[in-house]
Amino acid sequence: MEMKDRKVQMMEEQLQKKLTRQVVASLVGCVHCGMCNDSCHYVMTHPDDPKMTPSYKADQLRKIFKRNHDWTGSVFPWWVKAGKGLTDDDLDGLKDIAFGTCTNCRRCTYNCPMGVDTATLNRIMRGLLSHVGVMPEGVKVVSKDQWEIGNQMGVLKEDYIDTLEWMSEELAEELGHNRAAIPIDKKGAKIVYVINPREVKYDPRTIKKAALIFFAAGEDWTMVSEGWDQTNFGLFSGDDQLGGTCGKRVYDAMEEIGAERLVISECGHGYRSTRCEAVNWSGEEIKFTMESSVMTMLRYIKEGQIKVDKTKNAERFTFHDSCNNARSCGFYEEPRELIDLVTTDFEELEHNRQEGLCCTGGGGAMSMTEYTPRRLRSGEVKANEIAATGAESIITSCHNCVDGLGDVLKHYKMDVKVTQLVDLVAEALVLDEAQKAPDPVVAEVAAPAEVPAVPPVVAKMDEEKEMPADALRGRRILVVDDEEDVRLFLTTVLEDAGATVFIATDGNEAIEVAQREKPDLITLDLSMPGKDGIEAFTELRKTAGLEETPVCVVTGHPEFRKLIYDRPVTPPEGYMDKPVDEGKLVSNIRRILDLREKRQ
Ligand code: SF4
Ligand code: SF4
């Protein structure tokens, strides 16, 4: 056999290992009746393209099966439409079908009278292609990060821990005490809470809100420093080995803590992979229970562990069922029960529960930018039905869906926000007086002469609140912002804290001043005329002598957060939303600079 066909041969051999009874049933069960066609959002939005039909996509794998594993197909391939044999040159075309025209949403399966599971077949095709290294670049990069760094967004352990500490600090500032601080690696805790790395990178306040809810419920819980990523790119790439490894990391963390229950933050594919699939992929014996945080929050309210006031969420909401939570895990009613307890105005989408339409971001689609135009076109049906509800916000219990829906809403210019249940429960939460009470102040009573004096107990938060007036003395900071009043505010606050401040009004000037003055840190606005902050940030990271300079983004455009963190460069060291609080600005900058020094 020629070299060029080696990959095909490897794929054919690999398929042999995947042929379970259920897979074979789906391979041989299709009668090409076409009843599933209209259930696929790609067909709905590309009605003239027969290559979008579920049966066409699955037929690509059927042909390999028939030629190699079916007697008639191997002898008379033309008789069973097994096609001509594949060559390695055909694999890029197969990649585009398997990764670019199907989000593995399983809606077609629910509309097939023969029970054919096209998504499972598509995942197998992806797995065969991944096995020989044929996959979109995004899938390669994310899989590599999950293999090598231990989470799919390549978040470093220091940055993860730092984010948890940062969220604990914010909670302490908001509550006036630090009893809600996030526990890390607390041995013997009852619950371990695992998250999606997207929360660390783009949405850390969902972690803070979950911590607040655990605190209000009086829960004995912890987060873990290893095995904290509940997501699993093995589900998307079809690589069962990666899938098993990711699951095992989380299961090992549970074992290490000795917890009874694993709570998985709102993420459809993470919930499906960790709770259902990775147990099989890893072959691990599981001795604890697993649930989505949606179930945890629902139980807290129903059992009176937390109190909520639903009038705090009074706008109109609708709900998007994540394909993985809903169709793949039968998780339909719990989010609705919870929504009913924390909101006052709710309207279902036309297609809901098992009939829900994909957000377009399923199956790892958000990482495959080459297929974005087709994906966005396929979102038209979803956009239309969201508009029909008149909702101001769409709720979803999945981080992937937050991004998928966010892109669709932006593309179709819709003024609808995307939110999650953790946001709504935290908003509706009513703390009791004891939970709101500040830490008791320990009076400095003179100790009896014969007893050694015990130093007064002072909460860590209070120490940090007492940031010295000259917390930034000797620091050189470049403030980049196009708005004069913002520049003036930031400059005054930083100079009052002892820093020497330089200013720049756009991206070009920022690079020029940074090269000249070599500041210790740069605060960077994102939206500026001329060279904007996003471009300037990328350039700073690539400029010799400036690539290591810490950057704290200070922006009034939270929607740009994703853009800045998606750059192929080291992410910024800090991020703050405008309007900026004086104290937080100084403490955040000090924290970034201290952390940098610790690492040097
Ligand atoms: S997958 Fe099912 S519904 Fe679709 S064409 Fe085949 S038999 Fe018909
Ligand atoms: S799994 Fe979803 S995206 Fe894939 S063919 Fe079926 S309906 Fe279409």
Image (tube, rainbow, N blue to C red):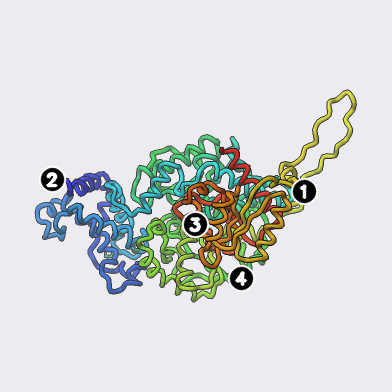
Q: Is residue 234 above or below residue 396?
A: above
Do we see residue 291 in this rendering?
A: no
Read off the residue under disc 2.
1
| Residue type beneath disc 1 | Pro
Q: Position of residue 235 (x, y in %)?
A: 38, 50
Read off the residue under disc 3.
399
Q: CA distance from mark 4 to mark 2?
A: 65 Å
> Which residue is at the front of the view, 162 or 228?
162
Q: CA distance from mark 1 to mark 3?
A: 34 Å
Element carrying mark 4: loop
Element carrying mark 2: loop
N-terminal of the pair, mark 4 or mark 3, is: 4
Do we see residue 314 in this rendering?
A: yes
Q: Nearer the viewer, mark 2 or mark 3?
A: 2
- Neighbourhood count class around disc 1 (C-alpha, 10 Å): few under 14, some 14–19, many 20 upward: some
Q: Position of residue 541 (x, y in %)?
A: 49, 51
Q: CA distance from mark 1 to mark 2?
A: 75 Å
Q: Position of residue 555 (x, y in %)?
A: 59, 61
Q: Nearer the viewer, mark 4 or mark 3?
A: 3
- Relative to 258, is 273 on the left or the right? left
Q: Which mark is residue 438?
A: 1
Element carrying mark 3: helix
- Neighbourhood count class around disc 4 (C-alpha, 10 Å): few under 14, some 14–19, many 20 upward: few
N-terminal of the pair, mark 4 or mark 2, is: 2
- Relative to 301, is 36 on the left or the right? left
| Residue type beneath disc 2 | Met
Give the quarter of the figure containing the C terminus.
top right
Q: Which mark is residue 349?
A: none
Q: Is residue 252 above or below residue 206?
A: above
N-terminal of the pair, mark 2 or mark 3, is: 2
Read off the residue under disc 4.
315
Quadrant of the image occupied by residue 556:
bottom right
